[in-house]
Image (cartoon, grey):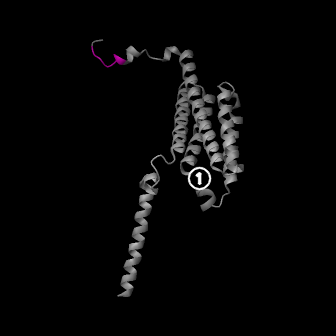
Amino acid sequence: TPRLSSAASDVYKRQTRSDAHQADLLVNPVTRSGLPWYAGFVTFCGILAWTAAAVAAFAGAWVAGLAGRPAASRFLTHGGLLTVVLVFDDLFQFHSGLLPDDLGVPKVLVLGAYGIAGGAWLVGHRAEIARTRTAGLALALGALGVAVLVDQLGPGTPRALLFEEGIQLLGVLGWATYFALTATDVTRSVVRARPDKVAPVGSVVGAGRPGR
């Protein structure tokens, strides 16, 4: 029976590991790790801001597409896709966990790839970007760039971490603000250019009422 006991023990261990993996997938990481409720608060705020930026970019791209402005639509679509990549990286920390630890891709190469993608977006859509609020975009990119430099070259002290996370959050908020304002500006320009295509509110509200 020792073999049976050993087999039963192996089955139990595999089941326990499987249950643990399921819990890792399903349970909130703060609850799972036993950390305080506010753990990761700044990071979560950044993720919400990244998400808002992506939603604004895609919404603006949709409006621009409806108005027959393909260049503006592509500019916002590609900006939204870049933002989606960044929000997933910030959420799952691909650049400092999965890619360097499990796949052997150096962190600096991952960050460099994001920088190249951002540069390609800026250069490829420079004409459209020039028509937007470029000062806000420059401030956002500058803050994010400083955060990356502090992450790579900083002393790793608590104060350096506070500065890095704070300036990164400001950069993400600036990024979200830029896309929100750009999408708003695109929508306003479309409405002003094609007022005949915008149905009055009263006609939409009363459209389904018989006898009117």
Q: How far across and down, in percent of the image, does residue 203 sit?
A: 38, 15
Q: Nearer the viewer, residue 63 or 87?
A: 87
Q: Can you see residue 204?
A: yes
User: Residue at the spot x=67%, y=24% of the render?
Assistant: 131
Q: Can you see residue 78?
A: no
User: Residue at the spot x=47%, y=17% of the render?
Assistant: 198
Q: Is residue 158 left or right of residue 212?
A: right
User: Residue at the spot x=58%, y=31% of the render?
Assistant: 179
Q: How far across and down, in percent of the image, does residue 41 sit?
A: 51, 44
Could you say whether the residue bearing mark 1 is in a helix, strand or loop? loop
Q: Is residue 179 left or right of residue 13?
A: right
Q: Magenta segment: does it hold 208?
A: yes
Q: Quadrant of residue 130?
A: top right
Q: Quadrant of residue 80?
A: top right
**Of the residues shown, which amino acid type is indicated by label 1?**
Phe
Q: Classify 5 as above or below 100.
A: below
